[in-house]
Amino acid sequence: MGIMKKQLVLIAMLMAVAMSVSAQPPQPTIVSKADRSTVEFVVRDSKPILMDIYQFKDQDTEKGRPVFIYSFGGAWAMGSRVDALCNPLYDHLCEKGWVCVAIDYRLGSARGRDGKPAIAPPEGYNPFQYSIDIGVEDLYAATTWLIDHAKEYNIDPSKIVISGSSAGAINSMNAEYYICSGHKLAKDNLPVDFNYAGVIPMAGAVYLTGENDTQLNWDKKPCPMCFFHGSTDPTVTFDVENNPNRHGFGPNYVSQQLYTMDVPYMLFEYFGGDHVMALLPLKWFWNEIDSFLDRIVLEGQNIKVHAVEKSPKPRTNENWLDTVRPGQFQAVNRMGGAAPGGRPQGAPQR
């Protein structure tokens, strides 16, 4: 029991960050310029999992459009694809010709009203790794659904970018690592030889829990990545976290590996910032996101950037109320709200 508690420390820290504001307003109404459709992309244990597809249906395009898939944060215990903070970014990307997809996924750390886990991991399955893995499996399912419906939505399956905040960013980074390290989850749930066109983690890292997982070993080159991270993030490691129960590999570590492998990347380090970088890129870093998507993903430029932003008063979890723009307060508060209704359950398919 003691080891299990240690393994769940990161989840507890993520939940503390997500619930840092005690008074939670109602979830804001979604206002979107783009056309939105909701589809069921997979069923787990007789429960559907949904995604919202944002696009301009009358957009005149000669070839398939690129896709941006976003996974919300919330410590694998709370959250929803319905997130007003994200919609301005979705509208912006859709206007540039992208199709944006907001997905739900199973929440492996969620608890029921009786306080017991809503989803119980199989016998011997590390609970922390299990939460990540079922999120990754659902991300793969969303990806496969979009590939299968590429003609219907006029999308380019070779230009699918995954992104996310906090837990969603960890899911995204693990998803790419699993593809490039021959993990069974990737082999069983994605088309042969498929890879993403890019990964945009907002306060994310690769986390592994095996005894020998003390470093990342890539069997093939990963896709380009664009990291957003606070240099003093105490919740998700910026560099390396090694202990007997969990091994974390943040953007400072991964970007050095990408440099060695000659893989394009952009690392935007917020010097002195903490886990607040899970949210700020959605509002403040559109130029950087555009640069990565346009120059690296679409144009194929081999660019390697490590940019450090310093501020006399960096935005942190403690002072973000003093630094966010008007109107962002209500949007940021959604991190403490749990998704309504029941949560899908089930173990990763093996």
Image: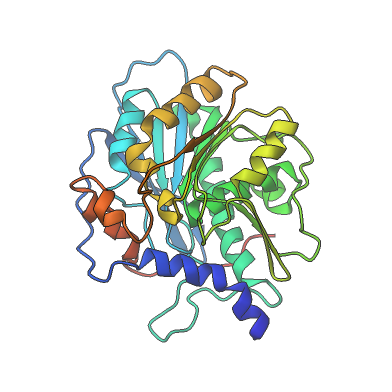
* Model colouring: rainbow
Who's the residue at 35% across and 49% down the image?
313
Residue 251 screen position, x and y as percent: 60, 45
Q: Position of residue 288 (x, y in %)?
A: 43, 30
132 and 249: which is toward the camera: 249
Q: Nearer the viewer, residue 192 or 112?
A: 112
Residue 109 visible in rendering: no
The answer to whether residue 243 is visible is yes
Q: Residue at x 46, y 32 (%)?
A: 67
Q: How far across and how far down the image is residue 71, in percent?
A: 45, 49
Relative to 222, say whether 189 is above or below. Answer: below
Judge left or right: residue 20 versus residue 12: left
Residue occupying the point 25% across, 53% down? 322
Say which quadrant the N terminus sits in: bottom right
Residue at x-position 64% and y-position 38% = 255
Q: Residue furthest top?
A: 62
274 left or right, relative to 258: left
Q: Is residue 182 above or below residue 106?
A: above
Placement of the C terminus among the 4 image quadrants: bottom right
**In this rendering, is residue 167 above or below 122?**
above
Q: How far from the left and from the top, in percent, is residue 132?
A: 58, 60
